[in-house]
Image (spheres, rainbow, N blue to C red):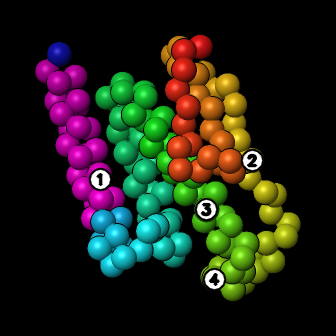
Amino acid sequence: DAVRTSSYLYYLSEARRTKEKLAKITDEKRRRGADTTPDQILPLVIRYCVKIAFFYEFQLKHEKSLRYLAEAYRHVCRYYLYLRSNPKSIEQTDATNLTDIATPPTSVSNVTHDGVEVELDMINNPKKSIVWGNA
């Protein structure tokens, strides 16, 4: 029981610490007048979203974890479009032509997890990408 409590508190503090880092990045850009996070730092935002999602999984908070994974996926799609439009921004010399890369899926429907039905729609509704309902 002591190990469970100790690990729960550890992952709780790590989630808070990572959320503070994420907020620091995104809030700094908003203070400068930008509506969205610049495309160049999206990999860092994606990394923090995935880390937070894993920390919530370890705490057995599946809905919050799914929310952050969906947010990370939304940023991955946006970063993919950025890379497609700016092939010179890729630092790898072998991957300068992105036409061989498959387009990521634009929606995922009816994904169920512990009785929660989730629908992701990245094209038609990018701001509100999660629709919650009972399965």
Q: Quick one: quadrant of the N terminus?
A: top left
Q: Give the mark, 3 or 2, whose residue is nearer the N terminus.
A: 3
Are there few (<14), some (14-19), or many (20+) residues within 10 Å of tag 2?
few
Q: Are marks 4 and 2 in contact (CB under 8 Å)?
A: no
Q: Give the mark, 4 or 3, whose residue is nearer the N terminus.
A: 3
Percent position (x, y) of residue 40? Answer: 51, 76
Quadrant of the rendered structure where residue 58 is? top left
Element carrying mark 2:
loop
Q: Is residue 92 visible?
A: no
Q: Give the mark, 4 or 1, whose residue is nearer the N terminus.
A: 1
Q: Which residue is mark 4?
A: 89
Q: Main secondary structure of the magenta part?
A: helix
Of 55 and 107, which appears nearest the observer?
107
Tell me which residue sits at (43%, 35%) in the image: 65
Percent position (x, y) of residue 68? Answer: 45, 43
Residue 6 located within the stretch drawn in magenta = yes
Q: Which residue is mark 1?
A: 18
Q: Give the mark, 2 or 1, whose residue is nearer the N terminus.
A: 1
Q: Which residue is mark 3?
A: 78
Q: Is residue 119 visible?
A: yes
Q: Are marks 4 and 1 in contact (CB under 8 Å)?
A: no
Q: Which residues are magenta?
A: 2-24
Count the marks: 4
Q: Are marks 2 and 1 in contact (CB under 8 Å)?
A: no
